Image: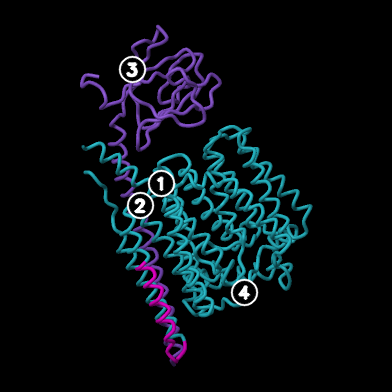
């Protein structure tokens, strides 16, 4: 008597368990989607604020050109770079500029020509950049202007 | 908006607690005499879950709540099935769960200094190769695989911890370099680990580490040619091992037809398939199956036991939970503050989910069975601690990502 009653309860409970598990699963998916949207919006907002821009000083043909920076930028000859400069002396992906908590950093992406920061070659270490620094890659020379550290019109 | 808040997952936690309490009440009334230990066990588990969730979310604001919920659900269903099979192993496992929680918190704290892992990278390489080599000398054989080390009364499985080390080795080398010349130590490491595991007959771990290395390599470099080459190399290695090792041939033969050797080698797979089939779509109901007929019912084959008692549909739900785990892990990797932590987070995600798919596919006879545990669900101290460490690393990266994003938000609105 007890056992058959218990069997019926156990049989009935499996539907309860299934409903519970399915509900948890669906809620996790729903929450994930909505949280993803929120994070995406915040990232969009953050990305819309630029840390500064790069201005070309050499070569002659591109002088005065300005490239706005994002929080992470690749720089090179290839079209897929965030900052794409069509010069033959650049590697397809030449350098990498990225923001960390204490400022903007520069790293060589493993190019043949190398990256010269104020005339010195950038090694394996990431280099912290300051406003007014000059970056030389092949025949391209850029000057960095950081936002918030210049005159209001800059 | 100067700080962003995460939605609370307390509702889902309540549902998991409800699931545990009802399941343990059902187990308590299993015999005509009331089993008080089931209530005590359920109470301990609920207390641990509440403590873990409240402590983590109040100390670390950016902890990923849904990963925690998924892991806790999987642990809960694992412990329920283990208690139903044998209360003694469930009590052991809940102790390992406690140790695993400590390991998780430790990993979360360590991930605040990700460069620490990059500095001890050579130590990790030498350590894991050394551990696996030591297995050849002092390892104990369990189920035909020589992958246990016994110290005193405790035995542990080094391959579980080698997995965790592999994540950091992969991320370190792939952060630094993008071409094949720069990562030769990584290639040598992966080759060495896989070869050692093959010799020790731990096929599951070998396939898992090779697969993870390949996937993380592809994600890091995006190099299709080399990935295809690696895949082809892996295939060639698999074929070679088929001719070299007897146990691989046996596994393959069982996979092709487990019923031919039903009374011998094929018994486990055949019993597992019969258990799943007898459960059917809706299951037989908790406590109404006969899981002890399957060898390794509480470790590798726990998925078959769950399918028998809760039904195939809950089995599908468990696979879905692992899928959501991939998505959450990939999102954490995308929000990671730098390349190294991104690769670490992705490696952890790949490891956990690939492991679950290898063993689930083995149990349902989709691929040849290779004995590894189902992460979070199976019984096993090393497995539980390693899974919790991987979870902790993921949570650590999630916290770092959240803090970075919040810092950026603060700078935006002075």
Question: In the figure, is residue B220 to the left or right of A69?
Answer: right
What is the letter of the cyan chain? B
| Residue B336, quarter of picture | top left
**What residue do we see at 73% from left, 67% from top?**
B260
Cα–Cα gap, marks 4 and 2: 43 Å
Residue located beneath label 2 in the image: A32
Name the outermost residue toward the top. Answer: A60
The residue segment tinted magenta is B31-51
- Prevalent SS, magenta region: helix
- Looking at the rendered image, the disc whose residue lies closer to the viewer, 3 or 2, is 3
How many circles with numbers are drawn on the protein?
Answer: 4
Q: Which secondary structure, mark 4?
A: loop
Q: Quadrant of the C terminus of chain B?
A: top left
User: Residue B298 at what x, y percent from top left?
Assistant: 56, 72
Cα–Cα gap, marks 4 and 3: 69 Å
Are dots 2 and 1 in contact, CB under 8 Å?
yes
Are dots 4 and 1 in contact, CB under 8 Å?
no
Cα–Cα gap, marks 3 and 1: 33 Å
Residue located beneath label 3 in the image: A66
Residue B149 shows up from this direction: yes
Residue located beneath label 4 in the image: B153
- Looking at the rendered image, the disc whose residue lies closer to the viewer, 4 or 1, is 4
Numbered tag placed on residue B305 in the rendering: none
Numbered tag placed on residue B331 in the rendering: 1
């Amino acid at each position: 008597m007890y056992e058959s009653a218990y069997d019926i309860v156990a049989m009935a409970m499996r539907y309860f368990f299934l409903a519970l598990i399915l509900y948890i699963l669906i809620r996790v998916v729903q929450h994930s989607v909505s949280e993803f949207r929120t994070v995406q919006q915040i990232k969009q907002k953050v990305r819309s604020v630029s840390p500064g821009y790069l201005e070309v000083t050499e070569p002659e043909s591109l002088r005065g050109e300005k490239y706005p920076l994002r929080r992470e930028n690749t720089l090179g000859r290839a079209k897929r770079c965030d900052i794409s400069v069509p010069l033959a002396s650049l590697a397809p992906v030449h350098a990498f500029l990225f923001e960390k908590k204490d400022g903007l950093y520069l790293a060589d992406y493993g190019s043949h020509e190398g990256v010269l920061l104020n005339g010195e070659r950038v090694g394996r270490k990431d280099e912290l950049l300051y406003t007014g620094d000059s970056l030389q890659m092949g025949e391209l020379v850029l000057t960095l202007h950081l936002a918030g550290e210049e005159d209001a019109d800059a | 908006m100067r700080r962003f808040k995460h939605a609370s997952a307390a509702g889902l936690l309540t549902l998991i607690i409800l699931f545990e309490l009802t399941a343990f009440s059902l187990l308590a009334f299993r015999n005509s005499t009331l089993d008080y230990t089931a209530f005590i066990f359920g109470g301990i588990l609920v207390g641990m879950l509440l403590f873990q969730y409240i402590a983590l979310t109040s100390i670390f604001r950016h902890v990923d709540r849904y990963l925690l919920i998924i892991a806790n659900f999987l642990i809960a269903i694992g412990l329920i099935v283990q208690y139903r099979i044998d209360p003694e192993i469930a009590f052991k496992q809940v102790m390992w769960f406690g140790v695993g929680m400590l390991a998780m918190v430790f990993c979360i704290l360590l991930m605040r200094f990700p460069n620490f892992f990059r500095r001890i990278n050579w130590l990790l390489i030498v350590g894991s190769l050394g551990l696996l080599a030591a297995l050849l000398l002092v390892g104990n054989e369990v189920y035909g695989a020589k992958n246990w080390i016994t110290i005193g009364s405790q035995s542990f499985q080094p391959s579980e911890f080698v997995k965790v080390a592999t994540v950091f080795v992969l991320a370190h080398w792939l952060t630094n370099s993008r071409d094949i010349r720069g990562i030769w130590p990584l290639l040598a490491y992966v080759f060495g680990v896989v070869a050692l595991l093959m010799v020790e007959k731990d096929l599951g771990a070998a396939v898992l580490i090779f697969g993870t290395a390949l996937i993380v390599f592809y994600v890091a470099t995006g190099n299709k040619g080399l990935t295809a080459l690696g895949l082809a190399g892996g295939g060639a290695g698999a074929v070679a091992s088929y001719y070299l090792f007897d146990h691989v041939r046996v596994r393959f033969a069982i996979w092709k037809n487990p019923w031919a050797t039903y009374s011998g080698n094929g018994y486990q797979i055949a019993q597992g398939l019969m258990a799943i089939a007898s459960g059917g779509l809706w299951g037989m109901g908790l406590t109404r199956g006969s899981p002890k007929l399957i060898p390794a019912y509480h470790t590798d084959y726990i998925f078959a036991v769950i399918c028998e008692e809760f039904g195939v549909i809950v089995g599908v739900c468990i696979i879905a939970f692992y899928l959501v785990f991939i998505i959450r892990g990939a999102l954490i990797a995308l929000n990671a503050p730098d390349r190294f932590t991104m690769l670490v987070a992705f490696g952890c995600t790949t490891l956990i989910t690939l492991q679950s798919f290898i063993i689930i596919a083995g149990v349902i006879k989709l691929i040849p069975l290779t004995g590894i545990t189902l992460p979070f669900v199976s019984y096993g101290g090393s497995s539980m601690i390693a899974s919790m460490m991987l979870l902790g690393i993921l949570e650590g990266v999630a916290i770092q990502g959240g803090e970075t994003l919040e810092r950026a938000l603060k700078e935006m609105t002075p």
